[in-house]
Amino acid sequence: MNLGLIDAAIRGYGASLDEADRGRLAFFRGLWGAAQAAADDAGAGTDAAWEPPSAHALRAARREGRSVLAQAPAAVDGAALARVADAVAAAALAHGAFPPAVAEALGAVRWDRVVRASDLTLAGSDPAAWLADLEAVLADDGLDGQAARLGTLLASLALRPLIEGPAARASAALEAAGPEGPRPLACPVCGSAPALAHVGGETSTAGRGRRLACLQCGTSWEFERVRCARCGTTAQTSLHFYNVEGDDAHRLAACDECGGYIRTLYAGDALAPVAYEVEDVVMARLDAIARDPSLAAAEG
């Protein structure tokens, strides 16, 4: 996780953000910093022994829709993951952002026991499946829906620095292997759903291309400009774009066919250096537009 870029992006927004956005960014900056520091202290996150599959195997996996880590899992040390989760949870609770009952439930979680009870083999091969399994463990421990979901979010942040080393090498190997088959809807490295899209920057396509970004492992990959990032349809009449009035840099790409959407950054209109973690927080307001498009300015 590039904390220097994150800080530069936060500074770039400066006073243009409202108080709620600044508060959310301060909260998550504390969690990102805690996760990275704990991972560094534990000596985790590099997995120097991990090597990507061959270019031939990578192209075959791409054709079959399989992620790199599903093919060659990263080694995730359970004790290190529990220590990072402890640090992230402590930072979250110190911020005082949760209702008392939720804070009490999260404060009682024994992350060493929870991590051991989860299917840890999934953490380095299918993070989304591991998080689903861990949420079930938290629910079995008595956490209600909201507390279990928040605990899963904390675990997701804790896992990120432990797999991003192999993920970066996997992403470089994919680029070197070259494209094969359709551009994937899920992260080609870890299989997680993309958190956001980014129009602009460097791509292999003419004009302003589009990339999808996975915040679970830090990978981004090229994707078609006119295609739903959730179901893959290319029917232009089904695709619509919305934005908050006065903010052309952040738009919502919505699809009539699947009802899905993806929040999208337009780099040419951005007010700050681009850090996807920061953009994910800043674009949270677009979720309200997804629930009620009448709140937005429609582009078509």
Image (spheres, rainbow, N blue to C red):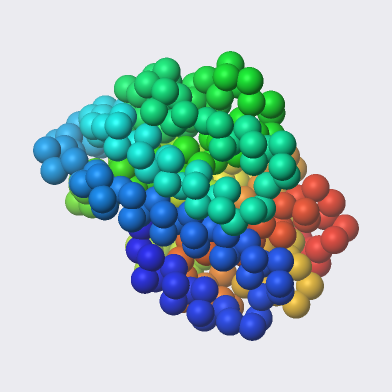
Residue at 73% from the left image edge and 44% from the top image edge: 99
- Residue nearest the observer in this picture, 223 or 157: 157
- Whether residue 250 is visible to the viewer of this picture, yes or no, is no
In the rendered view of the protein, which quadrant contains the C terminus? Answer: bottom right
Q: Quadrant of residue 222?
A: bottom left
- Residue nearest the observer in this picture, 100 or 135: 100
Position in image of residue 291 (x %, y %): 80, 47
Farthest residue in the bottom direction? 15
Position in image of residue 254 (x %, y %): 70, 50
- Residue nearest the observer in this picture, 17 or 208: 17
Figure check: 109 above or below 177: above
- Whether residue 192 is visible to the viewer of this picture, yes or no, is yes
- The total of numbered circles placed on residues is 0
As drawn, is 261 to the left or to the right of 70? Answer: right
Figure check: 291 above or below 273: above
Residue at 13% from the left image edge and 43% from the top image edge: 48
Position in image of residue 58 (x %, y %): 24, 36
Residue at 43% from the left image edge and 40% from the top image edge: 85
As drawn, is 142 to the left or to the right of 181? Answer: right
Position in image of residue 22 (x %, y %): 63, 70
Figure check: 287 above or below 11: above
In the rendered view of the protein, which quadrant contains the N terminus? Answer: bottom left
Residue at 63% from the left image edge and 20% from the top image edge: 142
As drawn, is 121 to the left or to the right of 26? Answer: left
Farthest residue in the right direction? 294
- Residue nearest the observer in this picture, 226 or 25: 25
